[in-house]
Image: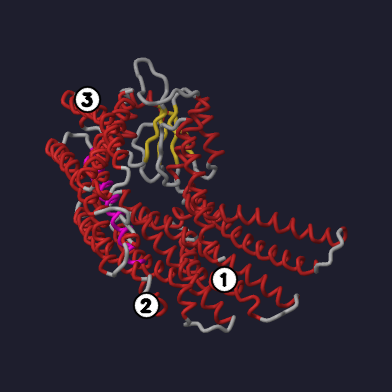
Amino acid sequence: MRAIRRLYFYLVTFISLEVVMWSVITLARTLFDASSLNNIGDQIAGGLAFLIVGLPIFLFHWFFIQRDILHDIEERSSRLREIFLYGSYLATLIPIAQNVIALVNRITTNLFNLDNTFSFVGSDQTVADNLVAIVVLSVVFLYFHSILRKEWAVNIPGNDLPGTRRLFRYAWMLYSLVLVVFSVIFLLQYIFSLPNTLGNSSRELLANGLAIMLIATPLWAYNWQVIQRSISNRDEIQSTLRLVVLYFLALAGIITTLTCAGQVLSVILRAVLEKEPVFSKEILEQIRNALSFGITLGTIWAYFGREWNKTIAVEENPFQRDALRRLYFYILSILGNLAVFIGTMGITQVLIDILFDDFTGISYYASSISASLSMLVVGLPVWLHYWPSLQTQASQINDTGDHARRSIIRKSYLYLIVFSLVVGLMSSAGMLLYNLISMLTVETAANPSIDLVHDSSTLIIVVIWLIYHYFALRGDGKAAQAAITKQHADFPVLLITDDDTELEKLIVEKIQITAPQIPVTIKPVRELNKNIESGDYQAVIIPANLVTGMDTAIKQAIGSFPGKRIILPVNQEGWVWQGLLRKNRLESAKETARIVRMLAENQPVQTVSNTNNLTILGYVLGGLFAIQLILLLIVRVISAFT
């Protein structure tokens, strides 16, 4: 209940703060720049109305929050308060930056003898509009800056000020980086338009690009240097947020660069096939945007990809380091695989048309050939660069190969491709059968043999891709089974029993079902009269009532045992096992067998499940959303070529 109340107060405070800020800005603009405003009475009425409504609401909720933190340490150290304070930073700093850019943007457009309407930012504003907004927003920023400095001075134990500050820094950096990217794209578009449009409307690109770059570049450089200096702290360089941001920038950079490279190559190939001048003004106009985006995002990829590699290299655990790289490699691998598949399909269809249809000249197929070849030229090197190394790693019969094969990313990659190909197989086979049957049942003036050859070639390509990935999936299974069999055989287990023979039989039975290669030795507690030899067993299973007792033989036997100890929680008078769910003998035996198998396979063991139905539902919905994003990205990449 306190969390819901806290969310209500901070959310209403933030919304009412925005209302008050922009109401004051509107009213101030009517005072200092009344001559340039249309419907000034309407502006005054709107500003006053929202100020009268918003100010009391803001003051009431904000004073309530400030009073609350004086009497409750938990309220002062809440994450929501930190997000609100740093959110107020962004709510003021971003509009300040936008207004500064608007001022400079209009100056640059005037320098190039252009009207203010050509300004990318603030085309319908005046100097007074921007200065009023900057002053009001700066006052609000300084107020919350003083509040936040006090929070850092107190620094109550249990807060997460460093984590929230990290979130603010990366959000602020990404905002300024987006501005830099836009400015560079504008300037490159202007440069590539010089041979065509020197001296005319392309000047707006130069004016807008310079204006944004003058403000955004030092802003980004400062923010990024602050972040880079902070990574001397190990928590900063190993933070999940840093890794996610670098992942995003590196992937966005390389995917956009490759897409743009494919577009440029497609246009050039089409010009060659149509026997047009490759370096003509028309060709340069067609590839201008692709070149601008490709060069800019290629630079982003080169720089942040290097930072991504540095961040991952800090990870000391080699298995964790490989896992961090795996997602990046598999995303590029699947995109390269898809490009090769579609390119192969397109080239095959064109060859069939040339061989079996009326050939009217290569220029007729120029668009299809250029799009397919560009996909192959761009996609094949990417796929061959990443996929063979991933296959080599997964084929190793060691811990590295075992971790690679068990990776959820690899399994998702292979099963997603196999699933898509099986659906494609059904579709292409259905179309092939449909054409075969329609040849007998439908009279048509068209050439059905061409459709038959097209459908057959599609089916053959799908089958080839499906067989290859099926064998890759099957190879994973065989290698994993061989590795697991060896791991199980090298993991002997000792089961110490008392008088509960039923539980003993169930445990042995479940272990034999779950992992039959694991050797299990049963030894009654009365025969345990010496230390357990470390070389004989890797794990020992013992009921809790024997551990909690005072038997000297038990203490001597398991006290110095270097392997894993699995305790069976049994009901015992006077003992309460906190955090453990009560299980019957069958459930206890199943859980014990599961733990033994996970220990034998060097997997982390979680003995208490804390997931509920809502958590599982959240995982399912999150997975479906992620799949939609991936499919959307794939469709956008395909559409860029077609």
| Prevailing secondary structure of the magenta residues | helix
What residue is shown with label 2? 198
Q: Nearer the viewer, mark 3 or mark 1?
A: 3
Image quadrant occupied by the N terminus: top left
In three-dimensional space, the C-alpha distance between marks 3 and 1, rounded to whole angstroms, equals 63 Å
Q: Give the magenta-colored segment's residue range.
A: 160-186
Q: Secondary structure at mark 1?
A: helix
Which secondary structure lies at badge 2? loop
**Disc marking residue 298:** none
State the CA–CA distance, disc 3 to disc 2: 61 Å
- 178 magenta-colored: yes
Circle number at residue 64: 3
Determine whether 116 is above or below 38 in the image: below
**What residue is shown with label 1?**
371
Q: Nearer the viewer, mark 2 or mark 1?
A: 2
Q: Residue type at mark 1?
A: Ala
User: Magenta span has 217?
Assistant: no
Q: On the image, which quarter does residue 566 sit in?
A: top left
